[in-house]
Amino acid sequence: MAPKVIVVGGGIGGLCLAHALRGAGVAVRVYERDRDPDDPVRGYRIHVNQMGSRSLRQCLPAPLWEAFLATAGHPGPGFRFQDERLRELLFVEEALMSGGSTAPADVHHAASRAALRRLLLAGLDGVVRFGKVFERYETEPDGRVTARFSDGTSATGDLLVGADGANSAVRRQYLPGPGRVVTDAVGFGARLPLTEATRKWVPAGFQAGLNLVLPSRGCAMFTASFTGRRQALGYQGAERLDRDLAPYGLDLASLTDDLEDYVLLAVIAHRRAIPPGAAGLDGEGLKSLVAGMTPGWHPGVRRMVAEADPATVQLMPFKTSTPVPAWPTTAVTLLGDAVHSMPPVMGFGANVAMRDAALLSSVIAAVHRGEDTLTSAVRSYEKEMLDYGFGAVRTAGRMTDLLIAGSPLVRNVAKGWLRACAVAGPLKRMSFGTRWTDETRQEPERVAARLG
Ligand SMILES: Cc1cc2nc3c(=O)[nH]c(=O)nc-3n(C[C@H](O)[C@H](O)[C@H](O)COP(=O)(O)OP(=O)(O)OC[C@H]3O[C@@H](n4cnc5c(N)ncnc54)[C@H](O)[C@@H]3O)c2cc1C
């Protein structure tokens, strides 16, 4: 069978799926609500972990994967856990998190959301239709499915994939129910530019890599620095890659991020710590609110908050999704945030969406080769996806709970465990080298077997 696939939503997951299906020769069309190919979420970068890296490599044509590597930021030395006075609790080296591998698909990357979107859209002319707001679907008598859009047009295929994000209209029709729920956590996000001037006083550990500041009570802070792009290609390499990118209508310069280097600051607090009316505060007002929640913290951290760019400060309630039991497989399925949205605490969401795309494309490719039926292939995708997808939701939820825990006992137990990991190598390896990445690990052998 040569299935025809309709994807609703041209976000990270939907576009990865489209590339992979196209690469496998499967007929695919993406219907995206936005009229503009530019990313609506401007200004922030996205942390692509090992799972995301492997999935991207699997989904993208080789020149686009190479361009991603050439333009992504450096992952940094690792993940540092500190208390509010910046006393180190534990440092987890990048090499430990990536299982000792330095292969590009096994390590973290800091990607510009805007550049990633340009890259994911490249080569999909004629595949992605913009300005198509999905409204509902209908199942045809022959089992195929028709998606209807607000402009009165429709599209019919053998499989409809809802990749339309956290407020998915496909999911609302397919799996009516609560879907997404509000958590007790809220996050403040802000950017502090890393310039020659700020580098003089930003505490060294915050100038590269990831950090978690975990006090014994009150809010916690996660930071990620996004610095420098790899220039490993050299002039000749860049020239060659530009030639390879030409058929995709891309060049390296168009992918070069226009953002300066910066530290992303994310303060996570219990919503009861937020006064009513906080949502109406401007950037300076929100920074003052955070300053009032972090008395006694290291002056360098307080200064990072005080000098963050007020135009970038955001307050956002964290939401999550409730686990869904397996459903009878039909000609409609879901991918990414549409099924398992989660708080952004661990930076998993896009990575899991990319994993979904890699997995779903590989099982559909097997159908295209005549090795499986569509129903059986989609069923196996859904079984696996629900398992690791809600595994990631649970992990992100547990971490969110820890970061907003009111009890000093809970925090001190967590800190004690981090200190124990710092002195006991095997415990650290077990916790951060294997278990830490379990949720995000994609077994290459299984994927390779599936791909034939
Ligand atoms: C502040 C913040 C930071 C984050 N940082 C990270 C990070 O570092 N790492 C990470 O892995 N994740 C991160 N995430 C999560 C990540 O952004 C999402 O999990 C990811 O974008 C989900 O991908 P998706 O393809 O499922 O959905 P989306 O990327 O949201 O794409 C959905 C697409 O569907 C379209 N759409 C919606 N409705 C319709 C409709 N009715 N008809 C047609 N099209 C429609 C939308 O326009 C959109 O293009 C972060 C999230 C936030 C909010």
Image: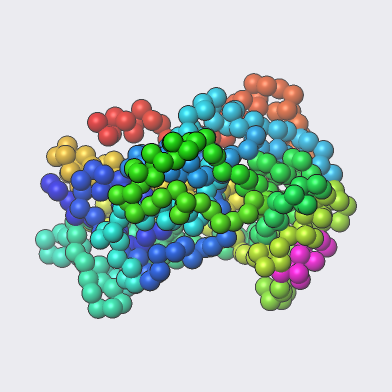
Q: Residue furthest right?
A: 296
- Residue 388 appears in the figure: no
Q: Which of the image's four quarters has the C terminus? A: top left
Residue occupying the point 40% across, 31% down: 443
Q: Is residue 343 left or right of residue 373?
A: right
Q: Position of residue 150 (x, y in %)?
A: 31, 77
**Magenta stretch: includes residue 286:** yes
| Placement of 242 over or under 304, stated as above or below | above
Residue occupying the point 65% across, 47% down: 225
Q: Position of residue 135 (x, y in %)?
A: 32, 73
Q: Which segment did they paint magenta?
A: 283-292
**Magenta stretch: includes residue 410:** no
Quadrant of the image occupied by residue 283: bottom right
The coloring applied to the image is rainbow
Residue occupying the point 64% across, 21% down: 426
> Of 235 and 260, which appears nearest the observer?
235
